Image: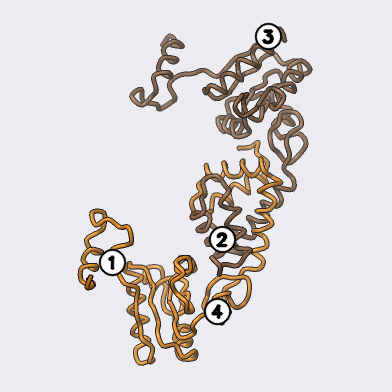
Chain colours: A brown, B orange
Amino acid sequence: MTDTPREIEALIDLMARLPGLGPRSARRAVLMLLKKRAQVMAPLAQAMAEVALHARDCQVCGNIGTADICPVCADDRRATDQICVVADVSDLWAMERGGAFKGRYHVLGGTLSALDGMGPDELRIPRLLRRVKDEGVSEVILALNATVDGQTTAHYIAEALAGSGATVTSLAQGVPIGGELDYLDDGTIGAALRARRKF
Amino acid sequence: MTDTPREIEALIDLMARLPGLGPRSARRAVLMLLKKRAQVMAPLAQAMAEVALHARDCQVCGNIGTADICPVCADDRRATDQICVVADVSDLWAMERGGAFKGRYHVLGGTLSALDGMGPDELRIPRLLRRVKDEGVSEVILALNATVDGQTTAHYIAEALAGSGATVTSLAQGVPIGGELDYLDDGTIGAALRARRKF
């Protein structure tokens, strides 16, 4: 379109790169922002600039925060002898929403993947091994996706930690709360059956 | 979540107010932005701040641009004797994407709606009547939605313009290009039949 001002077109192009928004919905979002310039657009631009300026990776665990040490690592009330290993910051956030884990995290930054050229050194695996040694960690909980890449990564880490003195565990597999058997895949049902417990 | 920094939570809340994004997808979008701080987040914040600062309603037609007079109204090559009346800026953009109209626009800013308390003075209807008189307009094309509110607004404007000397027309109704009869509603088929043309 020739008659949309250049700045607005540039904004639409950038918005369209967000996950969940395509060119059409980015245009609709920008129109909504244009109508609510003072109430939404200006505060959003401000909030985004602030986060872009201050956000950084935690130097200990790889979580994203606004300080060199993230709030989880800085929280003295959390156990230091348990480390939960996750692939991504989104997984850490999901674990925190559950609120069941009271230890520390380690964010790998992805999973091992020969196809994508992700080896142990592209992830934060060497740093994990160092933490386990230096911080007196007694348990490493692998909370990785139940995918091929996730499980390959889990096996690699478990092997690398053999002899470190730390117990390596992983999240239980089974029927999700509220899940209906009829809709579950066979692999999950099989895993849940193998891990059955006394009722 | 207690452990996400306050600034990031604030950003997620603001993003969740965009159309097409809910709380979950806003969180995912912010995570993507956090991972691409330099490449996407900073430029997006910058583009948004710039547009928020410079965007304004065209003083003639109500289109949104970055100057007091929008690019359409400022374009000397466009006919001044035809005004296309649309409800919203998004409709103007849709018309411009088509590229078939070479006159000027008038953006009402909504449609008449008793329920929402939108009367003629809440819309830019008085200004439209003044433009038709002052600018020597010969044709007013009503490009309003084929909804009850849209058609109520169209009838109101047509009546208000009676005796102004300008011809009032509206977009044709019929089968959309590429449309399949089987999937069309009865109202559209009826309208297309009544407006049938010699083949």
Disc 3/disc 4 C-alpha distance (Å): 73 Å
Which chain is indicated by disc 4? B
Q: What residue is shown at x 67% (from left), y 54% (from top)?
A: B45
* Residue picked out by circle 1: B174
Three-letter amino acid code at the position of disc 1: Gly
- Give the Cα distance between marks 4 and 2: 22 Å
Q: Amino acid type of disc 3?
A: Ala
Name the chain under label 1: B
Q: Which residue is mark 4?
A: B73
Residue name at image x 56 percent, y 51 percent: A16
- When the figure is inspected, residue B118 is found, relative to residue B36, above or below; the finding is below
Badges 3 and 4: C-beta atoms under 8 Å apart? no
Q: Residues within 10 Å of mark 1 (few under 14, many from 20)?
A: some
Near-viewer residue (A189 or B140): B140
* Secondary structure beneath label 4: helix
Classify the position of the C terminus of chain B by image quarter.
Answer: bottom left
| Secondary structure beneath label 3 | loop
Circle 3 sits on which residue? A162
